[in-house]
């Protein structure tokens, strides 16, 4: 598993706003659907990308066939594809000027990561943004997850989902 | 809101015992973990409720499934054991029930060491039989005896790290290798060792079970159990564990392992096991157990120091025929104890009193400081004669196999002055 500092991951999650989620499923039992819905609830704009669903609407957002077809600027590309396919998605992400490429749990493409980093992008591999958000916001502790975090300050949690925002995970050092 | 959380890797065991899982209360700033004495939690709206019930988002729903005080306890023990996640239950027995419920179907088998807590021998051999779950008994001192019992229907191997009541230290790594070859999870009951002495995940355990009632809580005031998921077992490699690998009808066809990855077992135990079986821990017990864990390292040091002194004394006592304590140099488990628990061999051990069953009964009737009761891991020193109490239901053969023959007396050495404990045993033995 690649190593990333907590500061880096917090910095990514607190600095991006518009996220293209490539390979998202319309099946509500799939992890990609969970992630899109969850991240929307935390205030991120999630734009679904899936050629098989192109033109349809998923969780209130129009589905695009590929990254290049999205008219809005994209901060981060979340890759729900296998490691090999992640290579092409990464190249598209570089081409559209995304700042971050995030590959999901189990997705690792070192060559693509190197290309993206050379182009000035930040790359996270083999992680889930929902899990990382839950870990930093303290929600993960609600199901006994070992967050590996000790904290001596109170979090802005406890008043339910509507009170949560991207601020709940705290800011990393600096911005991207 | 700045968050200065730091990684556990930076902190030692004592620090984790005090802090892991806890943070100041978000609403009040309370520094001690509050007792959230509530049954239920409001939803923001129907969509929020749907997300929680669909497992698309984690949150509090109902205290039978989870509670914020309980959650701190769970993360604390998960951190101390080095697991990915944990689930607290009403008792250690409930933890075992839910663990096996998540992996067994009628007609399935599992292999357990026969050197177990008598309550576990009963649960596995009696209650589980009614579900069609069949236990096969192996010898904790012989890893090959587990291999000989492997069968296509075998779903798991179960051992205690330090076995109750005999205090024997088990070769976790060797038995773990048998489990790994067979493609089944190794479940280790780490109650008597606690993670202060042994961290079974580091030796190959896939699941760690606790009775928190004992040394973790440590004060003899609350019953509780824990299941820790190591995150190491591949539940989807075969179809032997359908509750984890196959679409789950009560959650819209979610596959637990695919969705929850390295904490799939802990989540399955919560949302399918605890949800339906119902053996939830109370928030107040969670609070007391959590408070107990803060002093776990200090207490375990003193327990082990006292136990060693008592065992040494008894081993020279004319009324005592043998002492089974792994930290005595001539004990058969001494080598394993040096490997697995160099900080100490725990505080529960057995010895043989000359005069057999009658002498054992006289001893427990004569002590004045040690408490005659069916528990271990209290601050107080405890004594019991298993053949007449905890192991009474077993056959003579089972008693002997379980280390609970007629002359056997078990002590759980507390943290009082060791001279007082020894003096009380001496006067009791004089009467026996």
Image (cartoon, coloured by chain):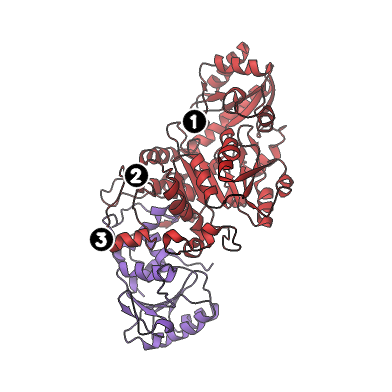
Mark 3 = which residue? B45
Dot 1 or dot 3: first in sequence order is 3
Question: Is residue B305 shown left or right of residue A29?
Answer: right
Determine crowd level at label 1: few under 14, some 14-19, many 20+ residues with C-alpha closer than 10 A: many
> Does residue A173 appear anywhere in the picture?
no
- Who comes first in sequence, dot 2 or dot 1? 2
- Residue occupying image coordinates x 42% and y 61%: B251
SS state under label 3: loop
Residue B30: name its quadrant: top left
Chain A: give its colour. purple
Residue B114, placed above or below residue B185: above
Q: Which of pointers 2 and 3 lies earlier in the amino acid sequence?
A: 2
In front: B86, or B331?
Answer: B86
The secondary element bearing badge 1 is classed as loop
Q: Are marks 1 and 3 on the same chain?
A: yes
Give me the disc on residue B33. Answer: 2
Tell me the chain of label 2. B
x and y, in percent, of residue B274 in the image: 44, 48
Residue at mark 2 to residue at mark 3: CA–CA distance: 28 Å
Q: Chain of mark 3?
A: B
Judged by depth in the image, the label closer to the viewer, 2 or 3, is 3
Please report the residue visible at 64 percent of the width from the left and 15 percent of the height from the top.
B358
| Residue B378: assigned label | 1
Asked if badge 2 and badge 3 are on a common chain, one would say yes
Q: Residue A7: which numbered mark, if any?
A: none
């Amino acid at each position: 598993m690649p190593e990333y500092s907590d500061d880096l991951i917090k910095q990514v999650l607190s600095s991006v706003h518009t996220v293209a989620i490539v390979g998202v499923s319309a099946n509500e039992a799939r992890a990609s659907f969970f992630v899109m819905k969850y991240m929307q609830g935390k205030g991120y704009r999630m734009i679904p990308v899936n050629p098989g669903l192109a033109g349809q609407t998923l969780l209130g957002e129009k589905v695009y066939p590929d990254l290049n077809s999205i008219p809005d600027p994209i901060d981060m590309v979340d890759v729900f594809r296998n490691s090999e396919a992640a290579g092409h998605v990464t190249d598209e992400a570089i081409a559209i000027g995304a700042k971050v490429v995030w590959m999901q749990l189990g997705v690792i493409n070192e060559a693509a990561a190197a290309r993206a980093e050379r182009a000035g992008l930040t790359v996270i591999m083999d992680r889930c943004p929902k899990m990382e958000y839950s870990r930093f916001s303290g929600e993960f502790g609600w199901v006994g997850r070992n967050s590996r975090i000790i904290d001596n300050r109170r979090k802005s949690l406890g008043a339910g989902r509507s009170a949560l925002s991207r601020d709940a995970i705290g800011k990393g050092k600096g911005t991207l | 809101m700045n968050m200065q959380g730091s990684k556990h890797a930076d902190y030692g065991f004592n620090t984790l015992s005090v802090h892991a899982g806890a943070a100041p209360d978000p609403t009040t700033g309370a520094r001690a973990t509050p007792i959230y004495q509530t049954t239920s939690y409001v939803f923001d709206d129907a969509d929020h409720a749907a997300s929680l019930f669909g497992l698309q988002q984690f949150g509090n729903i109902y205290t039978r499934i989870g509670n914020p005080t309980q959650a701190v306890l769970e993360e604390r023990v998960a951190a101390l054991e080095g697991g990915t996640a944990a689930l607290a239950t009403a008792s250690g027995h409930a933890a075992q029930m839910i663990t096996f419920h998540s992996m067994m179907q009628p007609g399935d088998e599992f292999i357990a060491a026969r050197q177990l807590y008598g309550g576990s021998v009963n649960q596995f051999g009696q209650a589980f039989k009614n579900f069609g779950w069949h236990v096969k008994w192996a010898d904790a001192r012989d890893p090959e005896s587990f291999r000989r019992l492997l069968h296509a229907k075998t779903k798991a191997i179960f051992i205690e790290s330090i076995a109750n009541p005999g205090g024997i230290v088990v070769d976790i790594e060797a038995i773990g290798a048998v489990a790994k070859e067979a493609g089944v999870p190794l479940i280790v009951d780490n109650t008597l060792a606690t993670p202060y002495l042994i961290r079974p995940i580091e030796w190959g355990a896939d699941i760690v079970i606790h009775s928190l009632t004992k040394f973790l809580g440590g004060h003899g005031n609350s019953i509780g159990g824990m299941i820790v998921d190591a995150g190491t077992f591949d539940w989807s490699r075969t179809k032997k564990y359908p509750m984890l690998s196959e679409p789950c009808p009560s959650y819209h066809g979610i596959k637990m392992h695919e969705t929850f990855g390295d904490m799939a077992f802990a989540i399955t135990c919560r949302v399918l096991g605890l949800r339906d079986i119902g053996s939830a821990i109370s928030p107040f017990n969670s609070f007391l157990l959590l408070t107990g864990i803060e002093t776990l390292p200090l207490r375990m040091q003193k327990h082990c120091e006292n136990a060693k002194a008592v065992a040494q004394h008894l081993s020279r006592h004319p009324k005592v025929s043998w002492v089974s304590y792994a930290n005595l140099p001539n004990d058969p488990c001494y080598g394993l104890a040096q490997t697995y628990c160099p900080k100490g061999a725990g505080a529960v051990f057995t010895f043989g009193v000359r005069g057999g069953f009658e002498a054992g009964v006289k001893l427990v009737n004569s002590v004045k400081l040690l408490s005659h009761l069916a528990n271990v891991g209290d601050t107080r020193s405890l004594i019991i004669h298993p053949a007449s109490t905890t192991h009474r239901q077993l056959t003579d053969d089972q008693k002997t196999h379980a280390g609970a023959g007629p002359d056997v007396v078990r002590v759980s050495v507390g943290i009082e002055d060791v001279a007082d404990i020894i003096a009380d045993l001496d006067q009791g033995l004089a009467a026996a």
